[in-house]
Image: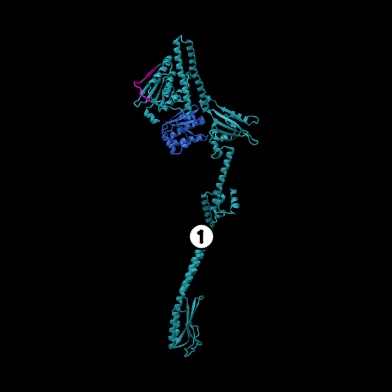
Amino acid sequence: MRIETNRHGAVTVIKPSGPVITQEDATQLRTESFDVLGNTLGRFILDATEMTFVDSNGLEALVEITDELGASGQSLKLCGISDTLREILVITELTSKFQQFEDVQTAVRSFL
Amino acid sequence: MTTVKTQSRFGIQRFFVRGESLVATTGMAFIAILAFAVGGVVWVSARTIDESVLMQNEERIRETSALIASQSELCLSDGDLSGLRRLMLDAVASGMVEECEVSISNLGVIASSNASRTLIAELPQTWDASSEVSGNIIHNAKTRRSVIHEPLVVDGRTGVVLSLVMNQSAQVVGSDSIRASSVGIMSVGLILMLWVYRRFRNRLGALAGIGDALAAAAQGERRMACLVVGENLGPEAAIWNTLLAEREAFEQASVTHEIIEASIGGGTESTGLPAACNTLIQGVVLVDSDLSVAYANGAACVFLRVSREEMTNSTLDGIPGSEPIIEATLTVLSNHGPTREVIELGNVEEIKSQGAILRVVVTRVEEEDMPRAMIFIEDVTQQRLADQSQDAFIAQAIHELRTPLTTIRLYAEEAVEAGSDDEQIRDKALNVINTETRRLERIVGDMLCVAEIEAGSLSIRTEMMRTEKLFAELEEDYAMQAKDKSIELVFDMPPKFPSIQADRDRLGQALHNLIGNAIKYTPAGGRVEVKVHFAENDAMTVWVIDSGIGIDESQQERIFERFCRADDRRIAQVTGSGLGLALARQIARLHGGDVTVESAIDQGSTFTLTIPGAQEMAKAA
């Protein structure tokens, strides 16, 4: 799995490419996200446009990230999630743990 | 624990204690009644057996006595005294009777089985036959013997009596033993039962009491006073009461902990006011007059980059970089200072290096003899960056508007001065004014578009349109500009232009921005090519290819953001609002298409605008 990191103003966007289906993928996503979280005080978006699939490892990582943000009253902002990922979140009843946006721009604007 | 025991001992047991089970007592009573009933049945049965045996015994006695009596009468009729005496001995020897004798009234015994008895030597010829002797049977329960007196008639004479002493039947003795053994067994059973009851009464009571308490708990009862069982009911009761006491102590500790947390802050609160404060994205810190932190929520810890433990157990002095906050706090806490201070930490320049801008509001909280300061911290980094971009946009927009306006004013003055004398100068001036006016119109259009995007109300009105005229106007508009800049502008048009479904004005706006950008960022001597292709389904693809400065790969997605321009010093030298590409992409996407870029530094860029065919556009809508 490849992870791109971009800055949109003061907001950092992490964009994983490919499925998050192994423990290594989840660890990589978690580590990268926690690093960004620590540096940006939570001004952080996960662009899931190219995150094609997430298994339990990936879901666990996402929940850990949003829980970490929850300590400061925030939650993980997801954008561009596919129908598959949306369905997974609905089935696992995790939808309410995340903020969802259509695209990166809308998600970035939510920090205003 | 001590409190609970005291309560149960003096407060609860006096009125109601679980564990005095009715089960054991009722069971005991039932078993006792059953035992007495069984005993009664056994007793009545034994008595019935006794009576039956007695009746049989009496019949046997009567038969035996009648037999001996008839034999005795025969012997007496024959005068055979020795035979009579032998009969007596034989009767005893046969076991039929214990004692046996024949006596004559007023004369004495003439024959007896008892050798010690004094007998009349000879059978008298006569005796007093007048005396009437009645027969009877006397049962002696004590000695278990029956005495039978049977009158004999000898040759029609009475006065002779046969006396027999017989044992009662063995069965009578047997029924007595049954009775005795059953009573004994019942007695032993009752004693054993009493022993078991005494031994297990308390423990059964404890189990029953715990059962009652569990049933009450299932109904929602949680008061310990209603769930406790008597402590004198054994180890089970003691363990149960201990568990209840531990649970109550735990609950009390939880409540105490929550209250402490709510009042002084810190820890990992999960309920109450601290939990509510932790859902705030603004940092909240309550500081005492000595600058010690009384409470801080999660966001405050994140903003000040300290852990919750460090925050709770420290003063503001111990938090790195908090000097401005301390200064504002001391100002607010001083009696004569303002009660509210607002400061900002950080600046926009630091944002690129992961810096942040924090807006800190410190307010004074008046409490008895001890003023406190409440500090609110908010991350306004993105807002400040947006403000800066907006400011830059306004400055740029003013510049963009002023440039054509200035040009228009100068050429208008020139046209007025030329008047009707120099038509060539006047026509040139009017052409420039026309061009600059259209440029001005586009800028205003872009700004209006931005406003619509900001409001989320940007929309398109599609209709069937032909694009030849649109591209002809674009070529005409930019030909002069390209020529002025010595750029080769090439429009590679298809032989046929089918009609497409699109918003003409918006599509023109997007293409203006793409072509205008290409000319703007291509140095003199460069080349800009506009290539158009229509697919079979009438989907239109427009490539705007330039040989300009190019865009670094890391910047290629950013340039489509509003107010964003690539980080390149050569771009900074060119005026631009940072809106054109964002608008172009937004317009293309509203049509169901997109704008993408392929570029490399110093190798030019290719922007591709796609507009789907009418059918695909309808599906996308």
Q: Does residue B499 belong to the magenta stretch?
A: yes
Instruction: Measuring from the top left, give residue B576's x and y in whole percent.
Output: 47, 20
Q: How many marks?
A: 1
Neighbours of disc 1 within 10 Å: few (<14), some (14-19), many (20+) = few
Is B368 situated above or below B221?
above
| Quadrant in the rendering for residue B362 | top right
The residue at which mark 1 appears reads as B27
Instruction: Measuring from the top left, give residue B33's x and y in whole percent.
Output: 51, 64
Q: What stretch is highlighted in magenta?
A: B489-500
Is B32 situated above or below B557?
below
Residue with the most extreme bottom position: B125
Instruction: Measuring from the top left, give residue B59's x and y in whole percent.
Output: 44, 78
Q: Does residue A99 belong to the magenta stretch?
A: no
Q: Is residue B306 left or right of residue B66?
A: right
Instruction: Measuring from the top left, give residue B346's x and y in whole percent.
Output: 55, 26
Q: In which quarter of the image is the C terminus of chain B?
A: top left
Q: Decide if residue B218 is in sight here.
A: yes
Amino acid type at circle 1 is Gly
Q: Is residue B242 left or right of residue B537?
A: right
Q: In this view, does A53 lie to the left or right of A9?
A: left
Chain (cyan): B
Q: In terms of depth relative to the viewer, which is nearer, B488 or B21?
A: B488
- Label 1: which secondary element: helix
Q: In terms of depth relative to the viewer, which is nearer, B525 or B413?
A: B413
Residue with the most extreme top position: B421
Chain (blue): A
